[in-house]
Amino acid sequence: MEHSVKHPGKHSIKRQMAAIFIGVLAAAFLCVGLINAFFLKDYYMSEKQKAIISAYEALNKGVSNGLTNDDDFKAGMELICNTDNISIFVMDNSGEPKLATNRDYQILQKKLYSYIFEADTQNSIVLDTADNYTIRESRDHFSQADYLEIVGTLDSGEPFIMQTAIESIRDSAAISNQFFLYVALTAMVFGSLLIWWLSRRISEPLLELTDISRRMADLDFNAKFTCDIDNEIGVLGKHMNEMSENLEKIISELKTANNELQRDIEQKTQIDEMRKEFLSNVSHELKTPIALIQGYAEGLKECINDDAESRDFYCEVIMDEARKMNTMVKNLLSLNQLECGNDVVTMERFNIVSLIRNVLNSSKILMEQKGIHLIFKEEEPVYVWADEFKIEEVVTNYISNAINHCDFDKVIEVKLHRENELVRVSVFNTGKPIPEEDLDKVWIKFYKVDKARTREYGGSGIGLSIVKAIMDSLHRECGVRNYDNGVEFWFELDAKVQA
């Protein structure tokens, strides 16, 4: 199946990335230009005011402390005036100059007089006012130059004026904005070229990934990401390669599973044969008890023996055979559910030691009647993951089987052995070992090693088949082992902390 991939055109990631980055760059330059145009003058004036106020504070402190003639004070004030281009004039109370940093101090002296007597205030603008001084912006008629001035009275009472020239902010801002425009246009051109190149570098691996995904959709798993880049796109490409390998492996496994399914279908005939064999075995097992029930029932009806003891015996035989038939039918139903997979397996964590002890307590009377010595030394809890109800049935079958076949020293020993993350439960009973040729057959339905003894205790040959089916449903192992003096049956359960 082929897939047609529409070319992204104007919606390609390369064009989108370039448009976004160029737009951000242009917006940044525009914002800087607007800020420069609207706030440059205010910023310039603010810095000039800070400089002249700082000079005033140094002057006020020195004059107030009587340092007018001190060489260090003069040198400091001269440095401040040269650095910030400030001219200072201080007048004493008699009208004579007390401190002047400019030889042509007469111009400052006239301005100070005009401000004191408010004779020439039309050409100045008050910018700020404090207790001892006023900051003004003024223009000189003759030179058409702009100045920033601070006029007032020092703490010692002397009037003063401080002046610094300020350039034409409008002209400076226009020149600055014009220069910035040229720089911004040049940066936009080179930035756009750089962004277009970077967008192409980023989009090429993505286009390769797009092509790989298309080929993978066509089940072409030979497509591999080849760009060697150390970023998120490179990691994505590596993951795409891993996904391609995993998909190829999974498809191979699916094909294998399909072949196995075909083989299972071929085994259907064998299952039908096994069903026929099962019905034959059931018929055989039911034939004897049904015949006994029928014979003793006819004897009761015909009154073969009139005494009450004989009638009670006949009734007990009928009831016993009916009980055996009922037990066998229940076991067959349970086994059928397990083998068909219809039985629900509930995994839960429980104490296997407590479960075994409960089963042993239930069988205690029967063991005492047969003189059996029980050995079970486990005291500490051992937790496992399994279906508790089904494991109880397994343990019950093992214990019942051990009681029915216990002989010689008449000892039953139940042990728990933990290895790695598995717990092995074993039930050993003294008695005759199972013939080696029968060891693998004890799990088969209706198979009986000693038919006479099995019939004696009412066994049907289904118990161990149920054990095997339960362990298979839990995906765990079970088995049997011969010893010189007896037989041991075992099963294993998962003991991991998590199921």
Image (tube, rainbow, N blue to C red):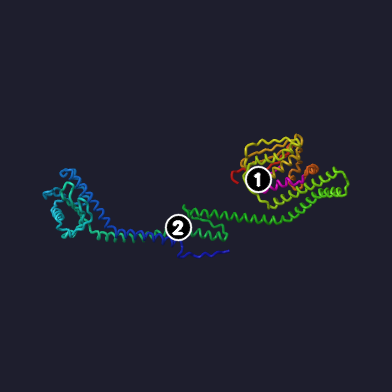
Q: Secondary structure at mark 1?
A: helix
- Residue 334 shown in magenta: no
- Residue 462 shown in magenta: yes
Residue position for label 2: 202
x, y percent for residue 3: 55, 64
Please give left or right for residue 135 compared with residue 427 in the image.
left
x, y percent for residue 498: 59, 45
The mark lying in front, picked from 1 and 2, is 1
**Badge 2 local density, few (<14 within 10 Å), some, or many (20+)?**
some
Q: Amino acid at mark 1?
A: Glu
Kindly report the distance in space between the C-alpha atoms of the residues bearing marks 1 and 2: 59 Å
**Badge 1 local density, few (<14 within 10 Å), some, or many (20+)?**
some
Q: Secondary structure at mark 2?
A: helix
Residue 180 falls in image quadrant:
bottom left
Asked if residue 485 shows in the view, the reply is no
Q: Nearer the viewer, residue 31 or 183?
A: 31
Q: Nearer the viewer, residue 71 or 56?
A: 56
User: Which residue is situated farthest in the top direction here?
Assistant: 409
**What is the magenta range?**
459-479
* Residue 121 higher or lower than 355, as above or below: below
Residue position for label 1: 388
Please give left or right for residue 435 compared with residue 422 in the image.
right
Residue at 54%, 61% (x, y): give it. Answer: 214
Asked if residue 106 shows in the view, the reply is yes
How many numbered callouts?
A: 2
x, y percent for residue 449: 78, 43
Q: Nearer the viewer, residue 382 or 418?
A: 382
Residue at 27%, 59% (x, y): give it. Answer: 173
x, y percent for residue 106: 13, 53
Are the two marked residues, 1 and 2, in contact with CB atoms closer than 8 angstroms? no
Q: Amino acid at mark 2?
A: Ile
Please give left or right for residue 141 compared with residue 277 in the image.
left
